[in-house]
Image: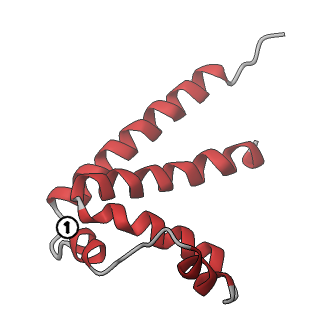
Amino acid sequence: MKNKSYPFRTVAYIVLALFVLLTAFWLVHFNRYHVLYYQGQMQLFRFNEFYFHSYWIKPGGISGYIGAFLTQFCFYPWLGAILISLLLASVYLLFDPIRN
């Protein structure tokens, strides 16, 4: 039995890829306040157990730790823009099976 939603799923993935590219382009070229660059400058992520423990003892600390890890990539505007775009696309990919 063939899946009838196959062409629509392909179109959805093409639209998602275009969304990622256009979002990354917008974040790099039309972002007036250069938020990605300044956010990346203010973050220092360290790979030691004391830094991890400082996040672990707080409620929701793992989310903060992951966010601090990802924020370090915003120092380079293109890398930060692609990262944010891929995170937005991953939300769609995670919730697409639930929607169907």
Residue placed most toward the observer, 13 or 87: 87
Between 58 and 26, the one nearer to me in the picture: 58
* Quadrant of the frame with the N terminus: top right
Image quarter of the C terminus: top right
Color scheme of the displayed model = secondary structure
Q: Is residue 47 left or right of residue 97?
A: left
Q: Quadrant of residue 75?
A: bottom left
**Residue 50, image x, y percentages:** 57, 82
Q: At x 32% / y 58%, what residue is drawn?
A: 80
Vertical relation: 14 (above or below) 31: above
Total labels drawn: 1
Residue pictured at 69% horizontal, 88% vertical: 57
Task: Residue 21: name its quadrant.
Answer: top left
- The crowd level at tag 1 (other Cα within 10 Å; few <14, some 14-19, many 20+) is few
Residue positioned most to the right: 1
Query: Relative to residue 21, is residue 6 depicted above or below?
Result: above
Q: State the residue at coordinates (29%, 71%).
A: 40
Type of the residue with mark 1: Asn
- Furthest toward the top, the residue is 1
**Location of residue 18 in the rendering, given as x and y in whole percent from the top left corner:** 36, 38
Query: Which residue reaches farthest bottom?
Result: 58
| Residue carrying label 1 | 31
Indicate left or right for 16 with 74 as reference: right
Above or below residue 65? Residue 11 is: above
Secondary structure, mark 1, is loop
Where 86 falls versus 36 (above or below)?
above
Q: Position of residue 76 (x, y in %)?
A: 23, 59
